[in-house]
Image: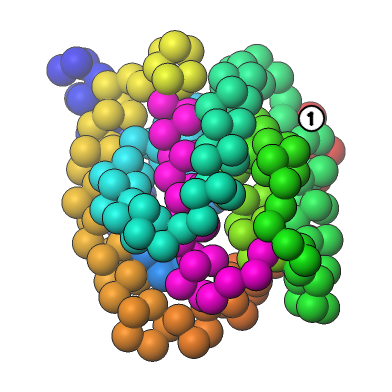
């Protein structure tokens, strides 16, 4: 452990520490407001200084306290008939995604998911909604896709958000559904990453240091939603999804061409 700690301290410059702190604060505020988006930002930005094998499990561990911080809202307001089937499918699919993370190139899968996200954003923006509560089959498929992407890249939230935003309901209900689905995603990868020995001392130390900042920024984002942000929730969520889709698609295409 001491050797790992010494190596970690030696590898981090003042710039990289400030970069990591700023990334977590921004990501956590967005998650507190929208209920999603933090993992993508953390994985995407911290991969540049830590590498994806470290950044993906760090995003998972750092977000666990926030998951329980936001969970009361989901329990109180979410539609359980949507959240439970979705969550079950994520836990089944996440181990397969973790296998992809440690053994295969997930670039093609990321390209497909990014295109799916952008198509969903376009359809929802143009007024498309699921006319009634989605059936178990649709929820299981969406959960399986999200769990697969979460296990392989730590960014399984967008498919869940796309489904939640397409369902009828108030901003508070949609956000609660998103929080419930993202909570399942945050937890489903933990056993798989542990089995693949991805929770190294480096990952644990970084996560413990960043977690308090994450929790504080989550609180600020949630407070903003309560005060005035709920009026802009749907537009902000769609815009965030669109940005996520474009950035993820661009990075996935770059990685595929480089490979």
Residue appearing at x 54%, y 76% in the figure: 170
Asked if 227 appears above or below 148 in the picture, the reply is below
Q: Which residues are magenta?
A: 167-190
Residue appearing at x 33%, y 20% in the figure: 200
Q: Is residue 179 magenta?
A: yes
Residue appearing at x 83%, y 61% in the figure: 119
Residue 116 at x, y percent in the picture = 80, 52
When asked about the image quadrant of residue 133, the answer is bottom right
Residue 210 at x, y percent in the picture = 26, 47
Residue appearing at x 33%, y 29% in the figure: 203
Q: Residue furthest left?
A: 2
Residue 173 at x, y percent in the picture = 49, 67
Q: Is residue 128 left or right of residue 221?
A: right
Q: Is residue 2 left or right of residue 17?
A: left
Q: Magenta-highlighted stretch: main secondary structure? A: helix
Residue 143 at x, y percent in the picture = 64, 39
> Which residue, given by chain and number where applicable, does mark 1 sit on?
259
């Amino acid at each position: 452990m001491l050797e790992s700690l010494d190596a970690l301290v030696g590898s981090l410059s003042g710039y990289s520490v400030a970069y990591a702190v700023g990334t977590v604060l921004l990501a956590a505020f967005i998650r507190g407001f929208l209920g999603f988006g933090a993992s993508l930002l953390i994985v995407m930005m911290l991969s540049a200084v830590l590498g994806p094998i470290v950044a993906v499990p760090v995003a998972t561990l750092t977000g666990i306290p926030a998951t329980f911080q936001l969970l009361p809202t989901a329990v109180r307001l979410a539609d359980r008939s949507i959240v439970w089937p979705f969550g079950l499918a994520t836990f089944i699919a996440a181990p397969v995604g973790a296998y992809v993370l440690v053994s295969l190139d997930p670039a093609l899968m990321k390209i497909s998911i990014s295109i799916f996200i952008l198509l969903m954003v376009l359809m929802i923006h143009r007024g498309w909604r699921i006319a009634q509560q989605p059936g178990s089959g649709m929820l299981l498929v969406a959960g399986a896709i999200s769990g697969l992407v979460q296990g392989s890249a730590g960014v399984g939230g967008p498919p869940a958000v796309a489904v939640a935003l397409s369902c009828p309901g108030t901003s508070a209900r949609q956000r609660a559904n998103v929080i419930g689905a993202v909570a399942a995603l945050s937890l489903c990868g933990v056993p798989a990453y542990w089995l693949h020995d991805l929770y190294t001392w480096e990952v644990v130390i970084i996560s413990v240091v960043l977690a308090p900042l994450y929790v504080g920024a989550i609180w600020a984002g949630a407070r903003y939603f309560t005060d005035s942000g709920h009026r802009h929730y749907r537009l902000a969520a769609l815009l965030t999804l669109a940005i996520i889709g474009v950035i993820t698609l661009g990075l996935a295409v770059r990685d595929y061409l480089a490979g």
